[in-house]
């Protein structure tokens, strides 16, 4: 299957971040748009959906002729970071894409094992939650809250 343009842009930015050495990169939207032969709003879409805080990124922007976007990869270094995620997730609906970003981040930071990651994906991103109808995103948000609470439990951390 061919990669979408958004995925190509995402992968390119991730390669730049890997090569940067410090987990940050400064780019111009217009340069990326020219490189991928798209409009700058496509770059904005990728930044907003794939490089947000739930996915483990911090973005600084400066608009104008010399404008840039600085993307900084943040890490989950300890339980305080998980606690912050938990506080953000409190009783809020959560979309499929936001849940997917969060799971990818937890897996990428080795907080979830491959098996746990697959299990969480099937529960949070699978079709079962569609049965909740209009409450799907609220239920997903509560399930993620339970997941984060269990990740913070000291007695379970030793088993990991």
Image: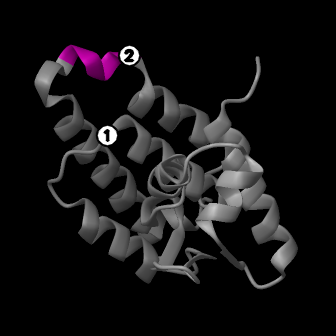
Percent x, y of residue 22 = 76, 85
154 up-or-down from 132: above or below: below
Q: Quadrant of the N terminus?
A: top right
Q: Residues within 10 Å of mark 1 (few under 14, many from 20)?
A: some
What residue sits right under mark 1 in the picture?
95
Tell me which segment is drawn in magenta.
127-131
For label 1, the SS is loop
Q: Is residue 46 visible?
A: yes
Q: Is residue 73 visible?
A: no
Residue 44, image x, y percentages: 48, 55
Q: Circle 2 sits on which residue?
A: 127
Instruction: Decide: is 99 above or below 157.
Output: above
Point 36% across, 68% down: residue: 85
Along the line of sight, which residue is nearer the eye, 116 or 144? 144
Query: In the figure, is residue 10 to the left or right of 83?
Result: right
Q: Nearer the viewer, residue 62 or 76?
A: 62
How far across and down, in percent of the image, does residue 117 sit? 59, 41
| In the image, residue 141 lies in the stretch drawn in magenta | no
Tag 2 secondary structure:
helix
């Amino acid at each position: 299957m061919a990669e979408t343009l958004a995925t190509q842009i995402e992968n390119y930015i991730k390669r730049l971040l890997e090569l940067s050495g410090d987990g940050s990169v400064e780019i111009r939207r217009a340069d990326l748009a020219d490189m991928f032969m798209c409009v700058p709003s496509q770059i904005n879409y990728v930044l907003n959906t794939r490089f947000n805080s739930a996915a483990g990124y911090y973005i600084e922007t400066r608009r104008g002729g010399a404008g840039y976007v600085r993307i900084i990869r943040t890490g989950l270094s300890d339980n305080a970071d998980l606690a912050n995620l938990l506080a953000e997730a409190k009783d809020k609906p959560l979309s499929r894409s936001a849940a997917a970003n969060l799971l990818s981040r937890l897996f990428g930071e080795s907080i979830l094992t491959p098996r746990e990651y697959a299990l969480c994906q099937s529960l949070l991103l699978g079709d079962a939650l569609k049965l909740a109808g209009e409450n799907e995103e609220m239920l997903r948000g509560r399930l993620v809250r339970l997941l984060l609470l269990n990740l913070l439990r000291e007695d379970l951390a030793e088993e990991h």
